[in-house]
Amino acid sequence: MDVKGVMGSISFDGEWITITKKEVGQQQRDYRIRAADVTGTRLKPATRMFHGYVQFVLPGSAPATEKKGLMAGGRPPHSDPHSLSIRHSANDAAAKLVEAVEQTRS
């Protein structure tokens, strides 16, 4: 199960979540999270005007706060390794991925 995000992607194989991020001028970075270790998920659907995001919360860490402003559109910072911004076209795929992670961790 894959979700194409803004400057990255999220894939879920039933046990591991892999968040791949690629910033302009930087090497690709992969972050792997075991679904059983996730204590919470956050999904903010994108609108036609603003990107949304998918975020995974792990034990001992607080969810990254949303940046305010017109360009950030209420998303966590790009440097947060446990979240990824999504476009409006990825809302359905992101909802299915979050649902699959929630089923796996419960």
Image (spheres, rainbow, N blue to C red):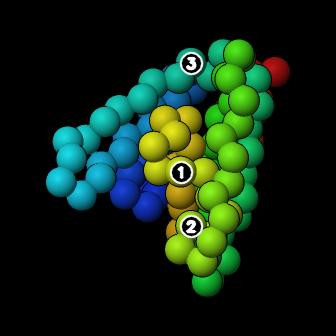
Residue behind mark 1: 77
Of callouts 2 and 1, the N-terminal one:
2
Residue 96 makes an appearance in the image: no
Q: Is residue 27 left or right of residue 98?
A: left
Residue type at mark 1 is: Pro
Mark 2 is surrounded, within 10 Å at the Cα level, by few (under 14), some (14 to 19) or many (20 or more) other residues, namely some
Q: Quadrant of residue 28?
A: top left
Residue at (60% x, 77% y) in the render: 70
Label 2 and label 1: CA atoms lie apart by: 8 Å
Residue at (53% x, 57% y) in the render: 85
**86 and 99: which one is in front?**
86
State the SS at label 1: loop
Label 3 and label 2: CA atoms lie apart by: 28 Å
Of callouts 3 and 2, the N-terminal one:
3
Give the image location of residue 61, x and y in percent: 68, 23
Give the image location of residue 34, x and y in percent: 56, 18
Direction right: furthest residue: 106
Give the image location of residue 88, x and y in percent: 59, 73
Residue behind mark 2: 72
Residue behind mark 3: 34
